[in-house]
Image (cartoon, helix red, strand yellow):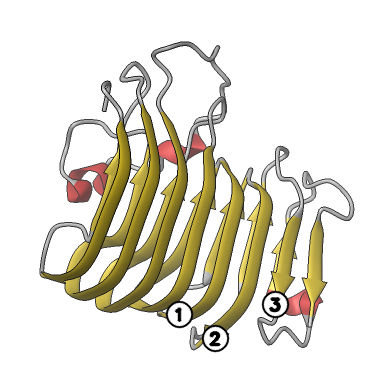
Amino acid sequence: MSGGVRNLHVSNCIFIGTDVGLRFKSNRGRGGVVENIYISEIEMLNIPTQAISFNLYYSGKSAAEDLDAGDNGSVEKLLPVTEETPRFKNIIIRNVNCKGALQGIFLQGLPEMNLENITLDNIQMESDFGLICSDAKDIKITNLNLKAKRTPAVDLKNSMEVIIDGLISKSEGFPLVHVSGKRTGKTVLKNMGITNAEKQVVIGNEVGKNKVQVIK
C-alpha cells in the first residue's frame, strides 16, 4: 500500500468460499493513502473469515491466522503520525449480499490514524459474528440487515461520528449493541428497533456522558 490506491470502482463481483470477501489491509510502517473507493453489487457465499474487512494491523498472515492470533484491536498506544502511517478514507460500499461468513463486517483502524469516512449502505449479512468497528471516525451505516449468531450484533470501540440508521437484526440474545473505549465520540443509533435501550445497548463506564444517542 506504500504507493497508495485511489479512484477505484469495483462492481458486479461474486465471492464463493474465498478466504475473505472485500479486504482492505495495511500496517504501521507501510504508509500510503487508500481513498475514493466505490464498491457495489457484490454477492458472497460461505466466506470462512470476514465478509467485509478493514485491518490496519495486518501481520502478513492469512485472515484465518490473524483471527487465531487474537484481538490486535486491543492495542491502545497512540504512535506519532508520520509518512509511514497508512491512511484509509472516503470508501463507499453498497448493495452487498452475503450468505454465510464467520465475521460479517470488521472495521479496524489505528488509534493514531482512524479509518475515515466509510459508508456502508444496503448490506444483507448472515454471519456468526456481526459488526465490529474500532478506531474509526465518520462511519455511516444505513439499511443493514444483519443475522448474527453471536451477540452483541454491533460492537463499537473507540470510534467517533458513527451513525447507524436502519438496522434489522435477527441476532439471538442481548445486547444488540456494545459501545466501549475512552476515545469513543458521538455515536447515533437510529431506526434500529431499540425498545429497551438499557437492555439492548450496553455502554462502557469509560465512555463519555451523552456520547451515545438512541433515536427510535
- Left or right of residue 13: residue 215: right
Q: Amino acid at mark 2?
A: Ile
Q: Earlier in the sequence, mark 3 or mark 1?
A: 1
Q: Secondary structure at mark 3?
A: helix
Q: Which mark is residue 146?
A: 1
Q: Are marks 2 and 1 in contact (CB under 8 Å)?
A: yes
Q: Quadrant of the C terminus?
A: bottom right
- Left or right of residue 156: residue 203: right
Residue 9's place in the image compared with 150, above or below, is above
**Residue 16 image offset from top left, x and y in percent:** 10, 72
Q: Secondary structure at mark 2?
A: strand
The image quadrant of residue 27 is top left
Query: Residue at (26%, 71%) from the top-left corner?
Result: 101
How far is the residue under mark 2 from the one under mark 1? 6 Å
| Residue identified by numbered label 2 | 168
Query: Residue at (33%, 43%) from the top-left corner?
Result: 7
- Left or right of residue 5: residue 162: right
Residue 79's place in the image compared with 98, above or below, is above
Q: Mark 1 Cα within 10 Å, few/some/many (few <14, many 20+)?
A: many
**Residue 48 image offset from top left, x and y in percent:** 18, 65
Q: Amino acid at mark 1?
A: Leu
Q: Mark 3 Cα within 10 Å, few/some/many (few <14, many 20+)?
A: some
Q: Earlier in the sequence, mark 2 or mark 1?
A: 1
Q: Secondary structure at mark 1?
A: strand
| Residue 173 appears in the rendering | no
